[in-house]
Amino acid sequence: MRKKWMCWFIGLALLLVLMPTVGVPVWENVTTSKISEDDLSKLTEAVTKEMTQQKKASVSVADVKSRMQVNVQRKDPDKKWVFGTAVIQAPKEKDAYPEGWLYVAKMEGEEWQVALEGSESFQNWMQDAPSTIVNSNEKKVFANRSSDVKVMADQDQLRLPFAVGATWTLTGGPHGYSGQNTPYSSLDLAGGNQQVLAAGSGNAYAMCGNGLGWIRIIHANGFATDYYHLWSNIQPNGAWVDAGTFLGYTGTDVSCGGYASGRHVHFALRYNNAYVSINGREMGGWVFWAGSNAYEGYAMHGSTVRYPGQGLYNYGALAPNQGIVDVMGSGTLNVRSGPGSNYPIVGTKNDGEIVTIACTATGTTYTGRSKTTNIWDRIGNGQWVSDAYVWTGSTSAVAPTCN
Ligand SMILES: [Zn+2]
């Protein structure tokens, strides 16, 4: 009860503080004590130049210039290298979200040279940077990324960003990082104990200059996840976090701009340093499907459908060789003693059951919801099911051929 009053009080206080600025965008000042004012203004100029040259931001050059916030998180003792976040702050209004990148910069002569997350030089400089700037774990994770357009991995191996076994409300279906924009990379979630947890392990960063509201985790498999609007978030500064690590509470924080009508986490998926569509992708045992409009769409676990406003049970992350039984709305899936319909039925699996595939073989062809295939999955000793009725994220076999 007391907590609730506190929320109201804080909300009211915030409202009063923000009231005079409504309609007039006021960008946070760049604040850091790590480098001199002069160095920082040169650095900000260099980051802005790099960002506009690379056309990184989705806003105009003028907006990049006026909204840019360059945060220095680490500095080499001899000042030759810095590492931090570069954020284009958003207006404090609905469907506006900040954009942000990690950056690494080095002083060459009197000039800062800047590499932004996603560029080839970023990848190289992260390896070249001294250990005071980039730790060994970060070097490993960032070595696996490339600015080249690569085929996106079928499986992200992520859970939903709250406790496994808990059910939270999908308050907003697939939408853009900035609301209406595409790709639809983001979900809004709230509920339970409101504790937002890491969807996967990786190196974690607070993106905003004041360290509040927005966490990004760079996962080792090429994916990254963003969490925004957090209250009381951790200050990881690149530290490795395990899947399920507490990141912060759902909230309405808009430290880098934007708007939140009520407590939630804005959870977004990135791959190779850019937001990617979550359409047809699985997290926490749910496959997300975009609607024709932002915030619509639905999630499926087997044949179970959940729409925005409904609850999602967090099944945890699927292993690469796991799948979800989908019998397309009726009955159960026959388990046979061998890889084909000519083998006797030895059991059944229910819709939504998660199965682990030891190895695969080819047999009778079937057509399921997401694929037509002759692949059969061995899910136990003498237990086989058609892969057509198992959602694995892939139309190919996800386990090796059986001997
Ligand atoms: Zn959102």
Image: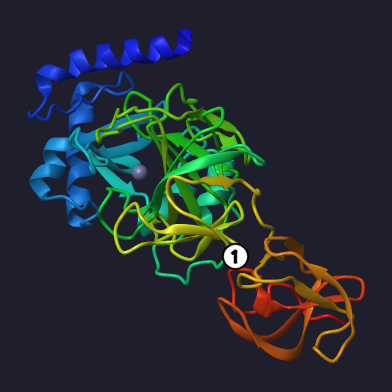
Q: Residue at coordinates 25% horizontally, 16% vertically from top-left?
A: 14
Up the image or down, 300 lies above or below 2; here it is below
Instruction: Locate residue 36: give its quadrant.
Output: top left
Residue 25 place in picture, x, y as percent: 11, 30
Residue 156 place in picture, x, y as percent: 56, 58
Mark 1, residue position: 303
Local SS, label 1 = loop
User: Residue pushed farthest top?
Assistant: 2
Instruction: Locate residue 240: give its quadrant.
Output: top right
Q: Residue at coordinates 29% horizontally, 59% vertically from top-left?
A: 293
Up the image or down, 66 lies above or below 177; here it is above
Q: In the rendered view, does 251 fall on the left or right side of 378?
A: left
Q: Nearer the viewer, residue 44 or 271?
A: 271
Q: In the rendered view, does 246 fall on the left or right side of 387?
A: left
Q: Residue at coordinates 40% horizontally, 27% vertically from top-left?
A: 251
Residue 204 place in picture, x, y as percent: 50, 37
Residue 242 place in picture, x, y as percent: 63, 39
Residue type at tag 1: Ser
| Ligand 1 quadrant assignment | top left
